[in-house]
Amino acid sequence: MSAPGELPWSLDTACPVRDVLDRIGDKWSTLILNLLSSGPHRFSAAQRAIPDISKRMLTQTFRDLERDGLIERTVYPTKPPSVDYRLTALGETILEPLAGLVHWAERHHDAIRHARHTFDDVTDTA
Amino acid sequence: MSAPGELPWSLDTACPVRDVLDRIGDKWSTLILNLLSSGPHRFSAAQRAIPDISKRMLTQTFRDLERDGLIERTVYPTKPPSVDYRLTALGETILEPLAGLVHWAERHHDAIRHARHTFDDVTDTA
DNA sequence: CAGTATCCAAGAAGATACTG
DNA sequence: CAGTATCTTCTTGGATACTG
């Protein structure tokens, strides 16, 4: 791929920015993080809150987030097993920068939509 | 899929947050945005600055960013054509929220790496 | 209830070669 | 120089069925 050690702020796998963006950039992580910001949720509760997600993706996203130390998984050994997921202290800290981006998205969504239409019109006409 | 109009803050295609995260979440957009934050770059200069990216992906990422109104493409009709890309005013505004995330990534990268190793050790041993 | 396992389809992205 | 075109591979994610 690329010769190592010659980039301004690195593209290789150790890049912290890549690390983070790869996580929050996936299809479900931010939704889950946002959901858990309102308190702990059980597996099935999360699925009800985000109906689009499949069990497979919900499990996987929970796992990835847990692996990164952003959420914590607690198993209650009841007769039908019950599990809940909640943000860790580390997980809480990402909410603010994330909110900054969400806020930006809401503020500029119209501008983006407008830009897209203009661009598409121009390139269609051309 | 999901019945429309019953979600807390919506998962459908119109969701502004999805819109933004899909863009900054892809493999190259943030790298490009960061690169252009230091000033306009020509196509070939961008390729030199980010050696991992292929022409194909560079072109496509530039296009997507241009379509969203975050960057501007200028063609100088010189003998060998020359093109440069620079942030628009809108593009500039995303730098700050993005920087917030980058800062978070840098601050907590060690914690994340540590969490990953711990998680992997535990699940391996189990 | 909370998953796991398997299979499959669609999209993202790399390699390579060619063009105005 | 700044791309396009094409082909192939890799990754993501959805559907379905089964389990402790």
Image: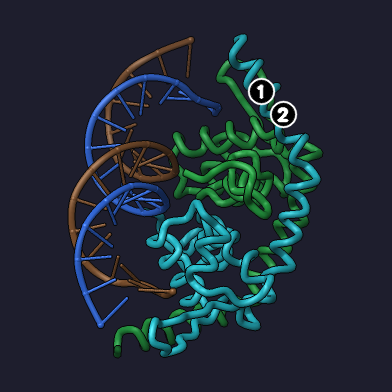
Chain colours: A cyan, B green, C brown, D blue
Subunit that carries the residue with mark 2: A
Amino acid type for the residue under numbered disc 1:
Phe
**Quarter of the image with the C terminus of chain B in it:** bottom left
- Name the residue located 47 percent from the left edge and 80 percent from the top edge: A83
Subunit that carries the residue with mark 1: A
Q: Position of residue D20 (x, y in %)?
A: 25, 82
Q: Which residue is mark 2?
A: A115
Q: Residues within 10 Å of mark 1 (few under 14, many from 20)?
A: some
Left or right: A39 with respect to B25? right
**Most foreground residue, B78 or A69:** A69
Label 2: which secondary element = helix
Label 1: which secondary element = helix
- Name the residue located 36 percent from the left edge and 87 percent from the top edge: B121
Tell me which corner region of the image, top left, top right, bottom left or bottom right, holds residue B108: bottom right
Q: Which residue is mark 1?
A: A119
**Residue A18, can we see it?**
no
- Name the residue located 53 percent from the left edge and 48 percent from the top edge: B26
Amino acid type for the residue under numbered disc 2:
Ala
- Residue B13: assigned label: none
Callout 2 touching callout 1 (CB < 8 Å): yes
- Name the residue located 76 percent from the left edge and 47 percent from the top edge: A106
Left or right: A39 with respect to B90? left
